[in-house]
Image (cartoon, rainbow, N blue to C red):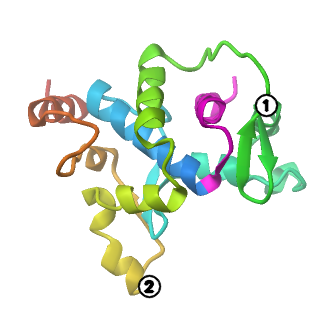
Amino acid sequence: MIVSATIIESLYYILKKIGKADKLKLTQLMYLADKYHLLYFGRTITNDDYYATQYGIVGTTVKDILSFDSSLPEEESFISKEEKDYFLNLIEKVENYNFKAKEKDIPFNMLSETDKEALDFVIKKFGNMSASELVEFTDKYPECHKYKDLFKSKLTKRERIDTIELLSTIENDPLEVSKEHIELVKEMLLGQL
């Protein structure tokens, strides 16, 4: 089984619905989909490790998949040959950092119904935003905003975000999750239920 098949299918799912997108936009949409899924269902779609950066919040595996260079030898790549092959079967790199879905019909076996719900929500709410608009929006969340001064002063390029930190909201949050539900999910993640 391909370790990151869920991430690859999620990226493909997004691209099938929004058309071409660049790496930054895709990383922000995946972050928002993971955040939505965590807030509502107690787990992320991707099980990725997240970092706050000056370019928004980025999942490391999502970034690695979108950054791979097919000309590199396998031992120098961040992803396996199987992951590369699966990615290249579904997604085409157009221009430097832009991607589009290939014309294929797949059953999305790696995505649950709630995964698709989260992806559909994010596509509907944020799919028309540019990469820079998405970064500006995601920077409002506490898990990213709290590091802005460090990034400006160049004291760090990235800061690891614990999954529990993703259980945050902002004023007039389009994710619309009640504080009570967030507390329930937090208790579940901390094993207090």
* Residue 159 drawn at (x, y percent): 40, 66
Image point (71%, 52%), residue name? 98
Amino acid identity at mark 2: Lys
In reply to whether residue 160 is colored magenta, the answer given is no
| Element at label 1 | loop
Examine the rendered structure and indicate whether residue 92 appears above or below residue 187. below
Amino acid identity at mark 1: Lys
Quadrant location of the C terminus in the rendered image? top left
* Residue 105 drawn at (x, y percent): 74, 16
Q: Is residue 71 visible?
A: yes
Give the quadrant of residue 164.
top left
* Residue 153 drawn at (x, y percent): 38, 87
Residue 154 has which mark? 2
Furthest residue to the front? 128
* Residue 124 drawn at (x, y percent): 44, 33
Q: Which residue is mark 1?
A: 102
Give the quadrant of residue 90.
top right
| Element at label 2 | loop
Q: Is residue 63 left or right of residue 104?
A: left
Examine the rendered structure and indicate whether residue 51 appears above or below residue 120. below
Q: Main secondary structure of the magenta part?
A: helix
Q: Is residue 191 visible?
A: no
Structural crowding at the residue carrying mark 2, measured as other residues with C-alpha within 10 Å and reported as few (<14), some (14–19) or many (≥20): few
Image point (81%, 55%), residue name? 69
Which region of the structure is painted magenta? 1-23
Q: Are marks 2 and 1 in contact (CB under 8 Å)?
A: no
